[in-house]
Amino acid sequence: MKLYIKNMVCNRCITAVERAFKDLNLEISTVTLGEVETADDLDSAELRKLDESLRESGFQILEDSTQQLIEKVKNTVILLIDTMDIAEDFVLSRFISEKLHRDYSAVSKLFSQNENVTLEQYFILQKIEKVKELLLYDEFSLTEISGQLGYKSVQHLSSQFKNVTGFTPSGFKKLKIKNRIPLDEI
């Protein structure tokens, strides 16, 4: 049985969801961001208990197909950005269409209607959160970050960063601002 889980955005989320299943003695076949495949079908009582347990940790079972698709889009974007291997000529619409095997304009419209932000804006917001993280860890130069996240130049990254945060990347880094937005809240 495949279940779609809201707010799974990192490996720690996978661990937390696995723990919820284990605590209820429910066997899992596979777990990926946003999806869990169970070994057996779950009855309504098991599903209800599982959903209650997941909600205590900030997750929930998604039954609505629209919400499942939106969560899949979000997780696809998060995983892409996490790889830090985005080409300068990257095209989000092509990537989403290929990954989800769906028409981008339909997915984008559905996303915008349900999330109050366009898919393109969501992608930018996720990239900026990754930039904040990398600046705080101080492992890469701004030039390296811009190259790894598909920016055409450091100036482009800096401009987008300032538009979103109100700070330049160097200003953000100097102030050691810790106001990162949790990925599940973007």
Image: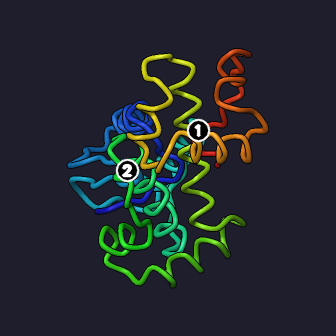
Horizontal and vertical percent position of residue 65: 48, 75
Horizontal and vertical percent position of residue 176: 68, 15
CB atoms at circles 2 and 1 under 8 Å apart?
no
Residue bearing mark 1: 129
> Disc 2 versus disc 1: distance between alpha carbons?
13 Å
Q: Could you tell whether 42 is left or right of 44 in the image?
A: left
Determine crowd level at label 2: few under 14, some 14-19, many 20+ residues with C-alpha closer than 10 A.
Answer: some
Q: Secondary structure at mark 2?
A: helix
Horizontal and vertical percent position of residue 15: 37, 32
Q: Amino acid at mark 1?
A: Glu
Q: Is residue 130 above or below residue 123?
A: above
Write the residue at 51% across / 83% down.
105
Write the residue at 40% across / 57% down.
76
Display coloring: rainbow
> Foreground residue, 61 or 106?
106
Q: Secondary structure at mark 1?
A: helix
Q: Which mark, by number, is residue 144?
A: none
Horizontal and vertical percent position of residue 126: 55, 47
Residue bearing mark 2: 80
> Foreground residue, 103 or 162?
162
Say which quarter of the image contains residue 122: bottom right
Write the residue at 20% across / 49% down.
29
Q: Amino acid at mark 2?
A: Leu
Determine crowd level at label 1: few under 14, some 14-19, many 20+ residues with C-alpha closer than 10 A.
Answer: many
Write the residue at 58% across / 38% down.
129
Q: Is residue 2 above or below residue 150?
A: below
Quarter occupied by the N terminus: bottom left
Q: Could you tell whether 62 is left or right of 56 in the image?
A: left
Q: Could you tell whether 169 is left or right of 37 in the image?
A: right
Q: Earlier in the sequence, mark 2 or mark 1?
A: 2
Q: Could you tell whether 156 is left or right of 14 in the image?
A: right
> Foreground residue, 105 or 49?
105
